[in-house]
């Protein structure tokens, strides 16, 4: 434990200085930043915090490993008992340390290219005898901090990890032994591989893996790595299936069919291995199940340092990425830069007051909200596009990947545009690039450079529109709008590999999808986003067309029940209707989806009978805050309920918004490994917490108005990189003091429980007077309600 203890002490004392090498997604800070990283608990979310409602488990599904903001590399341990983030806190058995992860997804993904230190000889194949190469450990001998992870395994080997944007560095300390071994399992991706290769050459190991299959999709990607060691190998070996070979230098595994490479596809096809690469005479070609191992002499010098570059283009680019971002820097220097990068980002919101637990939850949420989407282009700008071809990002910009669209359009995209407008604009451009490369076809949940089509709707339109509304406009917005309109109106052939809008013909002719209210409502929100971007770009024709389509929610309203519910093709409503029945909804039910008209809340409330009737329904709805999809109550650990606590602002009862949001913050999040009661969904739920703690919320995707809740901290300062400062003063605010008595905006008193778009774009000061009892009069004038957008509305159909 001595080596790890010393290392952890060094990490905790790291100097907080700007990153020496700024790159897209990781800008250098102009000066020293406070060490807010000390508040982050990377283990939060690695243990279920609530029941599994069938939407991906009851945990955050995050990972504790080394990563920088928006990092391509997420070098993290994977436990034997798996949950989608790769690491299950209750399990103290590690099977490898893989280079790629998704934080908070509800399905297994990535976990590509695991490395594993092993004390002993490789006598059986890790492919057929994996349990032999698992090591137990204790959480007492483990530590994680932003940009760093370290553990001493029960085998006696210590594994320490740190990262840059596109590379990682490991420091392995073996016990005194003649059997210090490191395994590189190129076939170890969590969803398996269809092809893989590993080459050992001098002091370098390189190769690639072809994987995919996210959430059962047929997506495919190839990821390359190059690992350079600063210690000579004592011996090398390879394995394939159940065969082990010592002294081998290369193993290549082909597809199960015996044909190398993934099946041919019109888009997203993995490129062929680099031409002209060295192939050893003993190369093997067969199915997945290959890897390599190397041994070291640790009788005197027990430490092995290695640098790993990652790329989705080539091994050469992986090598170049590590050289560009690490150079010859020592491990502690790289870890220090990673922590500094995090402090520069976390410093975008500085809070005063709050308990230690509140600070941990807040900055851990901010950490998780800044992990994804992640940089996908290499240090020279190259990346693989949705057309399977190489492209290059513009100088000073980066291509991003891994867009959890169905989730993040609700509030995380807005948080990124607030805190990282340059990155957010690049994210928007990346989405545009993907769509244009695919022929103006937009995904809804893409992984790396291929479609997955996971979830429903057309959420990228809302994301792009929101990013633009929040002032992150440095992307091709006219090109985005043209591709949006094309994607939202063109009927694709039914045999297309990926269909952007299933049921579009019905949506355009009937105004709804028969039997599918969830997708219908997602389409209407997407169309609202298109209309808003068109309005900002001065195209009233497109705005009017898509505002009319946005009001198709009316087609689902059944005045007999007061719910938005499934509708038959003949325009009748199925009977009987149970609002708690989730069978025709996506991760929710009729009671939860009925509120999902975020841009025309007033129209919905009028249909329901007005504010008084709505307040009574909302009070019943919040009988439970996290009831799951089979009860007619709120499901705040999942996205369809995200905006519902803020609906009281529209119903002349903002004091109820204040109470419900604070109850959610106080009960659904914790500072411990069981930190959340559901999937974090690549930062969406973390962003929801941040907005709740700030006391404002972007309730209307595609717009930048903010509805008002109540701040958790007495003093908050948000410094946008674009120059604006937002100051939020709320003396006395705490977990239990959350009722707004009055509010001033830039020194002027207001009774409106919302802020105009101009506030985000220009900045300003919010001054709250707080109390422990509700002020039912503040914000109670219906004329003060946040805006609703009713253009295109007709009598309920």
Image (cartoon, rainbow, N blue to C red):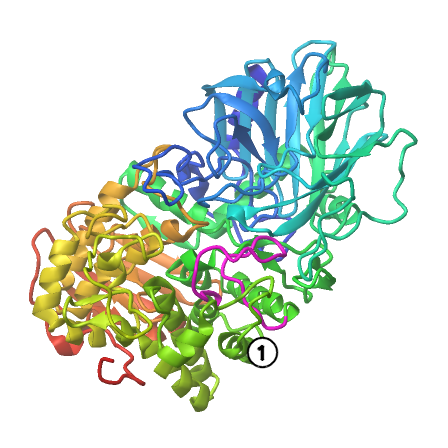
Residue 181 lies in quadrant? top right
Rate crowding at label 1 as few (under 14), some (14 to 19) or many (20 or more) other CA atoms within 10 Å. Answer: some
Q: Is residue 647 above or below residue 78?
A: below
Image quadrant containing the C terminus? bottom left
Residue at (72%, 63%) from the top-left corner? Answer: 391
- What residue sits right under mark 1 in the picture? 479
Q: Main secondary structure of the magenta part?
A: loop
Q: Is residue 474 above or below residue 634?
A: below
- Along the viewing direction, whichever of 659 and 571 lies nearer the viewer: 571
Residue at (55%, 42%) from the top-left corner? Answer: 101
Q: Is residue 139 above or below residue 381?
A: above
Image quadrant containing the N terminus? top right
Q: Is residue 115 visible?
A: yes
- Along the viewing direction, whichever of 40 and 119 lies nearer the viewer: 119
Q: Any magenta on residue 734?
A: no
Q: What residue span does the magenta drawing correspond to?
A: 439-460
Q: Position of residue 118 (x, y in %)?
A: 65, 18
* Element type where label 1 sits in the image: helix
> Residue most toward the bottom?
541
Q: Position of residue 220 (x, y in %)?
A: 64, 50
Q: Is residue 746 visible?
A: no
Compared across the picture, whether 441 is left or right of 504 comes to right
Q: Position of residue 38 (x, y in %)?
A: 43, 37
Q: Any magenta on residue 450?
A: yes
Q: Position of residue 418 (x, y in %)?
A: 42, 63
Compared across the picture, whether 387 is left or right of 92 comes to right
> Residue most toward the front?
570
Residue 774 lies in quadrant? bottom left
Compared across the picture, whether 441 is left or right of 176 comes to left
- Along the viewing direction, whichever of 606 and 11 lies nearer the viewer: 606
């Amino acid at each position: 434990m001595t080596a790890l203890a010393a290392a952890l002490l060094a990490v905790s004392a790291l100097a907080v200085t700007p990153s020496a090498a700024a790159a897209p997604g990781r800008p250098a800070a102009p000066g020293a930043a406070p060490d807010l990283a000390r508040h982050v608990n990377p283990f939060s979310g690695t243990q279920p915090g609530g029941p599994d409602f069938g939407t991906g488990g009851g945990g955050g599904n995050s990972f504790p490993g080394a990563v920088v903001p928006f990092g391509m590399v997420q070098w993290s341990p994977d436990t034997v008992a798996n949950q989608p983030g790769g690491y299950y806190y209750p399990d103290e058995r590690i099977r490898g340390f893989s280079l790629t992860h998704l934080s908070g997804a509800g399905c297994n993904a990535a976990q590509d290219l695991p490395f594993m230190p092993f004390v002993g000889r490789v006598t059986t194949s890790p492919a057929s005898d994996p349990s032999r190469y698992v090591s137990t450990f204790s959480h007492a001998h483990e530590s994680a901090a932003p940009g760093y992870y370290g553990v001493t395994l029960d085998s006696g080997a210590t594994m320490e990890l740190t990262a840059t944007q596109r590379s990682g560095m490991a420091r392995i300390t073996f016990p005194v032994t003649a059997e210090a071994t490191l395994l590189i399992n190129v076939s170890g991706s969590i969803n398996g591989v269809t092809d893989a290769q590993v080459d050992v050459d001098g002091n370098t190991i390189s190769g690639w893996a072809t994987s995919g299959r996210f959430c059962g999709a047929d997506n495919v990607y190839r990821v390359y790595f190059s690992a350079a060691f600063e210690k000579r190998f004592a011996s090398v070996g390879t394995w394939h299936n159940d065969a082990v070979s010592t002294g081998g230098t290369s193993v290549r595994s082909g597809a199960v069919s015996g044909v190398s490479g993934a099946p041919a596809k019109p888009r997203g096809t993995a490129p062929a291995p680099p031409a002209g690469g060295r192939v050893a005479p003993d190369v093997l070609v067969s199915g997945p199940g290959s890897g390599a191992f190397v041994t070291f002499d640790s009788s005197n010098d027990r430490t092995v340092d290695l640098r790993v570059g990652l790329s989705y283009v080539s091994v050469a680019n992986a090598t170049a990425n590590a050289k560009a971002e690490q150079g010859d820097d020592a491990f502690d220097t790289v870890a220090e830069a990673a922590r500094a990068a995090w402090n520069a980002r976390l410093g975008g919101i500085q809070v005063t007051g709050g308990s230690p637990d509140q600070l941990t939850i807040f900055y851990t949420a901010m950490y998780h909200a800044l992990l994804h989407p992640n940089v996908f282009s290499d240090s020279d700008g190259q990346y693989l596009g949705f057309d399977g071809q190489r492209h290059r990002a513009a100088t000073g910009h980066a291509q991003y990947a891994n867009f959890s669209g169905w989730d993040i359009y609700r509030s995380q995209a807005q948080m990124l545009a607030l805190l990282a407008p340059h990155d957010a604009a690049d994210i928007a451009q990346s989405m545009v690039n993907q769509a244009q490369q695919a022929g103006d076809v937009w995904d809804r949940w893409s992984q790396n450079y291929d479609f997955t089509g996971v979830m429903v709707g057309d959420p990228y339109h809302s994301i792009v529109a929101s990013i633009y509304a929040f002032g992150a406009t440095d992307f091709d917005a006219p090109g985005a709008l043209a591709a949006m309109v094309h994607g939202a109106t063109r009927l694709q052939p039914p045999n297309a590999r990926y269909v952007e809008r299933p049921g579009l013909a019905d949506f355009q002719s009937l105004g709804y999808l028969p039997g599918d209210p969830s997708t219908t409502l997602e389409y209407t929100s997407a169309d609202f986003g298109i209309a808003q971007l068109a309005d900002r770009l001065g195209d009233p024709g497109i705005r009017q067309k898509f505002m009319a389509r946005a009001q198709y929610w009316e087609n689902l309203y059944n005045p007999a029940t007061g719910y938005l519910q499934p509708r038959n093709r003949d325009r009748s409503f199925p009977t009987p209707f149970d609002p708690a029945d989730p069978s025709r909804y996506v991760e929710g039910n009729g009671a939860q989806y009925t509120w999902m008209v975020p841009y025309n809340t007033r129209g919905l409330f009028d249909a329901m009978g007005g504010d008084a009737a709505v307040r009574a329904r909302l009070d019943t709805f919040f009988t439970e805050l996290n009831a799951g999809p089979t009860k007619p109550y709120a499901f705040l650990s999942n996205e369809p309920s995200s905006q519902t606590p803020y609906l009281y602002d529209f119903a002349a009862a903002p004091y109820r918004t204040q109470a419900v949001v604070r109850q959610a913050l106080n009960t659904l999040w914790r500072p411990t490994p069981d930190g959340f009661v559901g999937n974090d969904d690549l930062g969406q739920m973390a962003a929801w917490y941040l907005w709740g703690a700030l006391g404002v919320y972007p309730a209307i995707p595609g717009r930048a108005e903010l509805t008002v809740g109540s701040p958790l901290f007495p003093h908050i300062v948000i410094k946008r990189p674009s120059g604006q400062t937002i100051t939020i003063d709320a003396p006395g605010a705490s977990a239990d003091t959350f009722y707004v008595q009055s509010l001033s905006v830039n020194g002027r008193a207001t009774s409106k429980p919302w802020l105009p778009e101009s506030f985000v774009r220009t900045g300003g000061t919010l001054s709250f007077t707080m109390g422990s009892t509700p002020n039912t009069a503040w914000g109670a004038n219906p004329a003060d309600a946040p805006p609703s957008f009713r253009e295109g509305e007709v009598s309920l159909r």
